Structure formats: C-alpha cells, structure tokens
Amino acid sequence: MSRRMFLGRWSAYIQSLALGAVLSVAVSAPVSGALVVKSSGPAGVHFSMAGLQPVWTEWTGADGVVRQRLEIAGFSPIAAGGGPRLPQRGTWVLVPAGSRPELVIRSEKWQAGHDHLLAYAPLTVTRLDGNGGGKLVELSLPPEQALPQGYVMGDGVAASRARAWQARGGSAVELGEVTTWRGRRVVQVRIVPVRHDAHGRVSEVLESGNWEIRFVADRKAAPPSGRPRLDTRGDTRFAGVF
C-alpha cells in the first residue's frame, strides 16, 4: 500500500515515497488551473497554481435577482448551509511527528471579480403542517431574506448558514486542524480562490499563487501512536478519502 504526502484529490499530481522522504515529482510547463508541487520533503511542501480563469454563468434566484455561477477549471463548486457556491479543492497532508504545519504565502495574484453576485445553494428547513408536525424541504433563500411564515430551521442550520455567508478575504489557502488517521498526523488543506462580501458580491478571483506548508518543530506535537493500520475496519472518517 503506497504512503502519500499529498492524498485525495491531488494524488494525480504526486508520486509519493514514505513519510519524511522527498517526493519525486515530474514538473512540466504549468497547465491552466493545475496544481504544481515544486518540492516536498520532511521540511515542508512547496506548491503553486497559475492561469486560473473564471467562467461566469447567469443564474436567477428566488427573489428574481440575477446572480452568477462561478466555475474554475480544476475546482469543484461547493455550497454549504444554503451559502454561496464557491469553487474549491482540497486534500490531506501528512505531518511529521514532533512538528506542526505552518502556511507561508509566497505570492498571490488576484484578478477583478467585477462585483458579481454569487449563486447560492438551497437551504434544508422544516415546513410545518399545522398539526404539530413538519416535513423537511429545500428552500431557495437569499442571504438577506428571513424564513417565510410556516417554516423553521434548527439552531445548527441557522449557525451553518451564518458561517457560510461570512465575508471572505485573506489567502486562498487554508489549513485545518491537525488530526490523526491510522496513527498518522494529518492536516486538511483547502483552496478557495474567491474573495467576497457578506452578500456574496465578488471582489476578487485568484489568478495565480505560490505557497509553502512548513513543518515547524513543536515539542507539544504528539508522535505517531504505534504502527499505522493498513486496513479500513472502523475507519469511517477517512476510508473513503485516502
């Protein structure tokens, strides 16, 4: 069974050796939207993207407002909690024992978003039936609009919706929390190449970027616990990802 520094959706770009070894990657001329790993080893991972080209398609919401579906080659449109549809891509990276991952932004170049309003996903809510019961339905709801009478949403759904519509700025790359998979420490890496306000109005779209994930020595970072498992029994969280 192979062991990978980059796993999941980016595995097509990487030929991996054991944890801590340098990856052997054939680097050719950059392709639009392609992720290129420039170097990888026990000190960290250096990767880049270039030539990202946004494609806009008109979409009309339930309120009659014309919005835009944004697509970028190499990214998948994802919308959570009734929030805006955002092109995203991500993977998991193995983190050496005794270290923590730290993101370094070497460069990012952004292009104009032309104030396009992003299309959004439907929201799952409960439609009351008037007899103390209800039925789960999907409701297309703009960010500024409250639930119509006769519909309710759980606290978790409301919180998820609020998070989904938070203004987005800063770097296109995000690192999640370090977690453990089969005795190995892993961290989620996510790329969202869009900056927008709380109404889904796009200010900028990523054109290119150059990043590094450094593995910084940290005494608090736990070493791997025992030998890694090579089977998927009980591995409900990650078995379908790696």
Image (cartoon, rainbow, N blue to C red):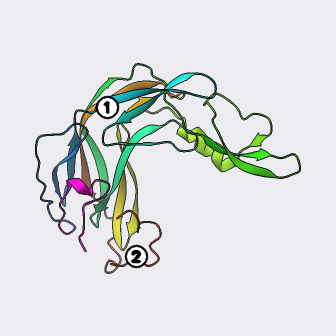
Indicate which disc residue 206 carries. 1
Say whether residue 212 is left or right of residue 205: left
In primary-sequence order, the first of circles 2 and 1 is: 1
Depth check: give the residue in front, 234 or 166.
Answer: 234
Q: Residue at coordinates 53% horizontally, 44% vertically from top-left?
A: 80
Q: Are marks 2 and 1 in contact (CB under 8 Å)?
A: no
Vertical position of residue 66 compared to residue 168: above or below: above
> Percent from the top left, x then y, of residue 22?
14, 61
* Quarter in which the C terminus is drawn: bottom left
Is residue 37 shown in magenta? no
Say whether residue 125 is left or right of residue 113: right
Which residue position holds label 2?
232
Depth check: give the residue in front, 202 or 149.
Answer: 149
Disc 1 residue type (three-letter): Leu
Our reading of the magenta stretch's main secondary structure is: loop
Q: Quadrant of residue 218?
A: bottom left
| Viewer-side label of 2, 1 | 2
Q: Residue at coordinates 24% horizontally, 52% vertically from top-left?
A: 214
Say whether residue 185 is left or right of residue 156: left
Q: Residue at coordinates 72% horizontally, 35% vertically from top-left?
A: 147
State which region is magenta. Answer: 1-18
Q: Quadrant of residue 93?
A: bottom left
Indicate which disc residue 150 carries. none
